[in-house]
Amino acid sequence: MRERANHPGSDSESSRRSEKQTRMPQASRNLPRVLILGGGFGGLVAAHALRRARVRVTLVDRQNHHVFQPLLYQVATAGLEAPDIGYPLRSALRRQRNADVLMADAERIEPATRTVHFANGNSLGYDYLIVCTGAESSYFGHPEWQADAPGLKSIDDAMAIRARVLIAFERAEQEDDPDVRRALLDFVVVGGGPTGVELAGAICELARHALKRDFRHIDPTQARVLLVEAGPAILPSYPGDLQRKAVAQLEHLGVAVRTSTRVEAIDEHGVVFDGERIAARTVLWAAGVAGTPIARSLGVTLDRHGRVPVSSTLHPEGLHDVFVVGDLAALVQDGHPVPGVAPAAIQEGDYAARAIVRALDGKPIEPFRYRNKGELATIGRSAAVATFPGNIKLSGFFAWLCYLMVHLVYLAGLSARVKVFASWVWSFFTYGRGARLITNPPRELTQPSLRTLPPVGPRREPPSHPVLVH
Ligand SMILES: Cc1cc2nc3c(=O)[nH]c(=O)nc-3n(C[C@H](O)[C@H](O)[C@H](O)COP(=O)(O)OP(=O)(O)OC[C@H]3O[C@@H](n4cnc5c(N)ncnc54)[C@H](O)[C@@H]3O)c2cc1C
């Protein structure tokens, strides 16, 4: 699939030969190519919006699926299965005859030759490029923290966090040192934005309800969850009264909240803030994001979060055949940054597609306007906060219902909606969290040990003497 770069969007001989063997209609092959990098919210909407356009759409993603990121925390805390929130990109575009899906890792964009180079050595030309590769976790100059404080951006991340959380309980069950056992049952979530709030609340619910009766030597309800935020308040984009309500709802669930607290170090033994070490074996990172590295190859100056500053028509400076949308775009509207949320990526992806159609028709392009439809953050069962245009504010049960409904509506695929709805109803009535499998368990949990487990008996609460007999 290696393509020449000197003719935008044109195919090399080898590519033409391979396309003859494909099911792409002959007439489509000479149409302008719109290359979309990233099959997230922005990319998928852009591809769909081009379904009737006289263009060839190529959607490239390093994964073969779209991820519904707002529900990642539920996979990470055993509430949902991974396939419930991932949707195959090929299925999403199955009926769209002008669209092609390519599973590849885009490494570099060469705007001068209108070419994108992939990690596998292939390259592809374009007439129009929509870059929507999103953001990744950022550790504020401390990449070494990542190993001990994983972030939550992909299904792999969610599965890794789920395993880490569940394994902490398994290890605690077999631990005879009370200090180590305490550290295993202490969880720290760094970052008080919506993801941190959701993760902290869900871990608390997992420990206090779903796992409550499952262990014999530890009491999972003794687990402690600490949510730490460097700024003066959690959920910084929400009004002050909703921030206070969110803290109250978190504390009601059992989460301790510390604001104006900056992380200084993270290692395998815990985390240090303001000179104080908290011995927590599970530290999760929800504090910062940065634009995906491919942005650097556009040759424009990026903002301090590695995002691409774009004009009101979503172009990076000087690149009129390139659109950057979603989390990767740094767009300022009426003096305020457009937030990195799914509705912004959806609206921008749709705009970029319509702008390309207008440009091909020789029509002028109106500037993009972001329409804020409100913000929702869930805290736990029957607990959430929400703001909507018109200064409408909700908290508690009704905000939580809105959260569930909105997320069901936006989730891709009818079967996923049905399954997620059924899971939510089931866990609402039973407090159950069914997705609790640990795959690839760590060696020390499965290999023969010199220590033997005590006979199963009534739970000792809290364990006051060695759990394991030598
Ligand atoms: C845990 C979490 C919870 C969230 N909760 C909410 C919420 O409740 N409400 C809300 O509105 N927003 C929420 N967001 C934010 C929202 O998900 C993002 O704003 C939105 O996904 C951005 O869409 P996007 O298209 O820009 O990027 P993404 O959806 O991140 O998609 C980027 C795609 O690009 C692909 N990609 C990246 N790099 C490459 C490469 N080099 N080559 C090929 N493919 C690549 C990725 O695989 C991915 O599929 C949440 C985000 C997270 C992480």
Image (spheres, rainbow, N blue to C red):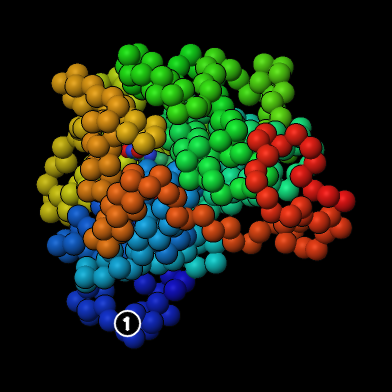
Q: Name which residue lies at 53% across and 42% down.
A: 212
Image position, residue 273 (x, y; %): 66, 21
Q: Which structural element holds mark 1? A: loop
Image position, residue 317 (x, y; %): 37, 36
Of residues 334 and 41, which is closer to you in this image?
41
Quarter of the picture containing the N terminus is bottom left
Q: Name which residue lies at 67% across and 16% down.
A: 274
Q: Quadrant of residue 279?
A: top right
Q: Name which residue lies at 46% across and 22% down.
A: 251
In the image, 151: left or right of 141?
A: left
Above-or-below relation of 403 to 132: above
Of residues 174 and 155, which is closer to you in this image?
174
In the image, 31: left or right of 6?
A: left
Image position, residue 196 (x, y; %): 48, 32
Label 1 CB sits under 8 Å from any ligand 1 atom: no
Q: How many numbered marks have been drawn onto this rendered protein structure? A: 1
Above-or-below relation of 272 to 347: above
Above-or-below relation of 19 to 306: below
Q: In the rendered image, is residue 303 in sight? A: no
Residue under numbered circle 1: 22
* Identity, as a three-letter code, of the amino acid under mark 1: Thr
> What is the residue that sits farthest to the bottom in this orientation?
21
Image position, residue 244 (x, y; %): 38, 15
Q: Quadrant of residue 438?
A: bottom right
